């Protein structure tokens, strides 16, 4: 199922479809604990992720770093993937091995739209990572921080 990590979905989707048609198990993990869904989320392969979820992949499996596919989708800022994973019961406030939530990852990478989606889904703004940093503390610059603050305010979310 490593095919789900191919950046080009026109290549990965047919391969994953073939593997699933041959009864490949989308719940298998690599030596790092990652599933095909982790790879699809990392590479923003939305159709592949949908297909995996339809074939009983779980959005609730953590890899050995404690990351869910949601952490990876947030780190690359893929809003449709984040919404899909949340719709499939991914816990929005789960922390990885570094104490980071998906919100920490989205903000640290400067993905304001992804951060707002997570906030609207109930992401907790008072969770600190292992260094004691709040997610908003990780904004790469004032522009990103201001965008998230303003967008949250417009949604009625207090930071």
Image (tube, rainbow, N blue to C red):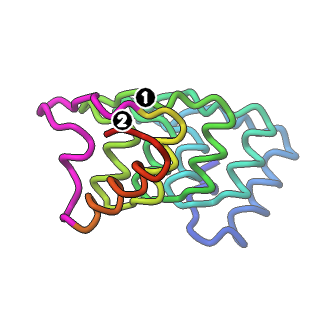
Numbered circles on residues, count? 2
* Residue 141 rendering spot, x and y as whole percentages: 19, 65
Q: Nearer the viewer, residue 47 or 157?
A: 157
Query: Which quadrant holds the C terminus?
Result: top left
Element type at mark 1: loop
Element type at mark 2: loop
* Residue 52 rendering spot, x and y as whole percentages: 73, 43
Q: Is residue 72 left or right of residue 60?
A: left
Q: Is residue 61 left or right of residue 46?
A: left
Distance between mark 2 and mark 1 Cα atoms: 6 Å
Residue 149 belongs to magenta span: no
Quarter-wise, where is residue 143 in the image?
Answer: bottom left
Q: Nearer the viewer, residue 50 or 116?
A: 116
Q: Nearer the viewer, residue 145 or 54?
A: 145
Q: Kindly identify which residue carries mark 1.
A: 93
Magenta span: predominant SS is loop
Contact between marks 2 and 1 (CB within 8 A): the answer is yes
* Residue 73 rendering spot, x and y as whole percentages: 49, 51
Q: Residue at x 76, y 31 (%)?
A: 56
Q: Nearer the viewer, residue 79 or 152?
A: 152
Residue 140 belongs to magenta span: yes
Q: Residue at x 48, y 35 (%)?
A: 68
Q: Earlier in the sequence, mark 2 or mark 1?
A: 1
Q: Among all residues in the image, which is located at the extreme right?
A: 21
Q: Is residue 145 left or right of residue 120?
A: left
* Residue 19 rendering spot, x and y as whole percentages: 78, 49
Q: Kindly identify which residue carries mark 2.
A: 101
Task: Give the magenta-colored segment's residue range.
Answer: 124-142
Q: Residue at x 60, y 43 (%)?
A: 37
Q: Residue at x 13, y 31 (%)?
A: 132
**Which disc, if any, is residue 70?**
none
């Amino acid at each position: 199922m490593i095919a789900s990590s191919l950046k080009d979905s026109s290549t990965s989707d047919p391969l994953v479809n073939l593997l699933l048609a041959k009864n490949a198990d989308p719940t298998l993990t690599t030596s790092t604990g990652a599933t095909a869904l982790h790879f699809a989320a990392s590479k923003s392969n939305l159709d592949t992720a949908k297909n995996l979820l339809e074939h009983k992949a779980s959005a609730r499996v953590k890899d050995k770093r404690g990351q869910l596919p949601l952490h990876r989708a947030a780190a690359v800022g893929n809003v449709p993937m984040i919404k899909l994973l949340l719709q499939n019961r991914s816990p929005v406030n789960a922390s990885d091995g570094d104490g980071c939530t998906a919100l920490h990852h989205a903000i640290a990478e400067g993905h304001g739209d992804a951060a707002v989606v997570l906030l609207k889904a109930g992401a907790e703004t008072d969770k600190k990572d292992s260094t004691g940093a709040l997610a908003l503390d990780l904004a790469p610059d004032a522009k990103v921080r201001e965008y998230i603050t303003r967008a949250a305010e417009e949604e009625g979310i207090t930071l």
